[in-house]
Image: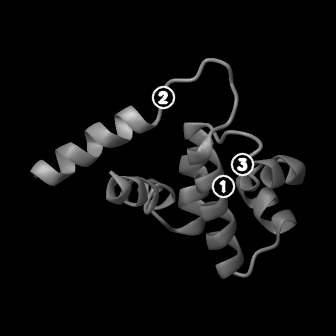
Amino acid sequence: MLASVMNDKFVQSAIDVDSTGRTSLVDAWIGSRVRSKRTSRGMSQQEFSKLVGIDQNDLAAFEGGVERIKANLLFRIAESLDVRPDYFFRGYAEKNVRAL
């Protein structure tokens, strides 16, 4: 339980609230996880973008970390890929916690 609380506090401090709309390292991490899971399922960007109801160019921008994925879309993506939403964050906090 303590480790979970510590991880939650770390994630909270590591992901700052950014009103500028710029993407960050966590956005690139999440995008790469989306791409990895999509390709492991054998889906093209075109197929997957139709499945989740977004433009293919938007999907490419999300996967490349150029655009930030909003929470409601991340939930739709997770459902479409049959993963829990936290799948997209796995490894990111752990990697940074080890560096501390």
Instruction: Find residue 21 and report its horizontal and vertical position in percent.
Output: 69, 25
Nearest-to-viewer mark from 2 and 1: 2
- Which element is circle 1 on? helix
Instruction: Find residue 67 and report its horizontal and vertical position in percent.
Output: 74, 40
If you read the primary sequence from the N terminus, does the residue marked by circle 3 or circle 1 appear first?
1
Q: Residues within 10 Å of mark 2 (few under 14, many from 20)?
A: few
Q: Which residue is mark 2?
A: 16
- Relative to the observer, which residue lies in front, 29 or 44? 29
Q: Which mark is residue 65?
A: 3
Q: Determine whether label 2 and label 3 are within 8 Å by CB.
A: no
Residue 63, quarter of the rendered image: bottom right
- Which element is circle 2 on? loop
Q: Among all residues in the image, which is located at the extreme left?
A: 1
Which residue appears at 46% of the width and 56% of the height? 92
Q: Residues within 10 Å of mark 3 (few under 14, many from 20)?
A: many
Instruction: Find residue 25 and report its horizontal and vertical position in percent.
Output: 60, 46
Left or right: 86 with respect to 7? Answer: right
If you read the primary sequence from the N terminus, does the residue marked by circle 2 or circle 1 appear first?
2
Q: How is the image coloured?
A: one colour
How far apart marks 3 and 1 lie (CA) works out to 5 Å
Instruction: Find residue 43 and report its horizontal and vertical position in percent.
Output: 76, 75
- Which element is circle 3 on? loop
Name the residue type under label 3: Gly
Q: Which mark is residue 31?
A: 1
Q: Determine whether label 3 and label 1 are within 8 Å by CB.
A: yes
Q: Where 71 falls versus 44 (above or below)?
A: above
- Relative to the observer, which residue lies in front, 18 or 95? 95
How far apart marks 2 and 3 lie (CA) works out to 16 Å
Name the residue type under label 1: Gly
How far apart marks 2 and 1 lie (CA) works out to 18 Å
Which residue appears at 57% of the width and 23% of the height? 18
